[in-house]
Image (cartoon, rainbow, N blue to C red):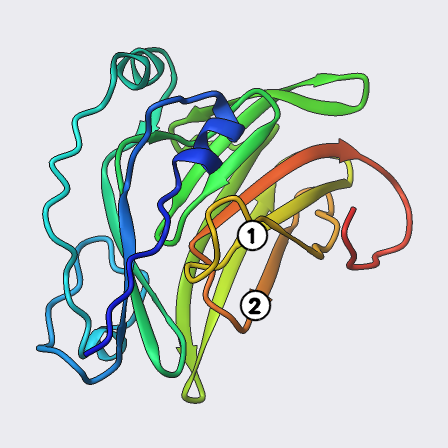
């Protein structure tokens, strides 16, 4: 069995929210069918059948730094998570320590995420994002969900964003593949978010991290591109 350690996500998170010191366990790719099957951790964005042959990473022993603890004391953080993403031959297992959902102008999105954020409008831009509990009557919030699904025998990444703003939004999206260096963020196209509507983005390759940024109000044609 060939296993090669991959880079973690500390740099991505530091760039997103200046959260220095985040040191997740490196992702571990394992060829499908080369090891004992293990149950997927909760939440499990990958169907149970996709985790056959996956091997859990060793315990990381990571202790958050003072900076990390201070950040999560003032900004809502997701708990420590472990997730799997797969392609036709490999399942990647990634462990991430507690990390913020949002920064001043960007959202961090990992497989298994399901959360709401709101923001301030400054000059037609959304700034100062912050996590909010699911509202009973959503207004001026975004609902973000990200998971990997398997359809017709193929894995796809599914990002769902529902906008509860009254005007059309566009935004930038950058993605990281689990087999690529942690600093390698690739631009990817997105579709505009219509007012009070849901947008679904699909990718055929595994994605371990999304950075969504530069949300702004803009009218125009319903064209999917890198905004």
Q: Is residue 152 above or below residue 187?
A: below
Q: Nearer the viewer, residue 81 or 58?
A: 58
Place residue 200 in its image quadrant.
Answer: bottom right
The crowding category of the residue bearing disc 1, from other C-alpha atoms within 10 Å (few below 14, some 14 to 19, many at least 20), is some
Dot 2: element: strand
Q: Is residue 59 left or right of residue 51?
A: left
Asked if residue 203 lies left or right of residue 208, the reply is right
- Kindly state the secondary structure of the residue where label 1 is placed: strand
Q: Position of residue 51 (x, y in %)?
A: 22, 73
Image quarter where the N terminus lies is bottom left
Q: Position of residue 109 (x, y in %)?
A: 46, 44
Rendered position, 4 above or below 217:
below
Residue that label 1 marks:
175
Tell me if I can see residue 94 in this picture. Answer: no
**Mark 2 vs 1: CB contact within 8 A:** yes
Residue visible at 11% across and 76% down?
37
Vertical comparison of 167 with 31: above or below: above
Of marks 2 and 1, which one's residue comes earlier in the chain? 1
Looking at the rendered structure, which numbered label has been put on residue 49? Answer: none
């Amino acid at each position: 069995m060939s296993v090669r350690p991959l880079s973690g996500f500390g740099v991505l998170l530091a760039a997103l929210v200046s959260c220095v010191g985040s040191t997740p366990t490196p992702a571990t790719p394992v060829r499908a069918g080369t090891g004992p099957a293990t149950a997927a951790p909760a939440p499990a964005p990958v169907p149970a059948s996709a985790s056959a042959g996956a091997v859990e990473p060793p315990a990381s022993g990571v202790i958050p730094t003072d900076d990390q603890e201070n950040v999560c004391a003032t900004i809502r953080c997701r708990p420590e998570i472990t997730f799997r993403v797969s392609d036709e031959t490999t399942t990647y297992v990634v462990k991430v320590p507690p990390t913020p959902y949002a920064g001043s102008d960007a959202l961090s999105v990992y497989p298994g995420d399901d959360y709401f954020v709101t923001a301030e409008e400054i000059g037609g831009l959304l700034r100062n994002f912050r996590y909010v509990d699911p509202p009973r009557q959503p207004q001026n919030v975004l609902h973000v969900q990200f998971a990997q699904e398997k359809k017709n025998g193929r894995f796809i990444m599914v990002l769902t964003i529902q906008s509860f703003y009254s005007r059309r939004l566009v935004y930038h999206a950058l993605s990281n593949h689990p087999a690529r260096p942690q600093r390698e963020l690739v631009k990817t196209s997105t579709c505009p978010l219509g007012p009070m509507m849901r947008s679904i983005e699909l990718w055929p390759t595994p994605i371990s991290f999304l950075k969504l940024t530069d949300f702004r109000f803009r009218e125009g044609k319903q064209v999917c591109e890198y905004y």
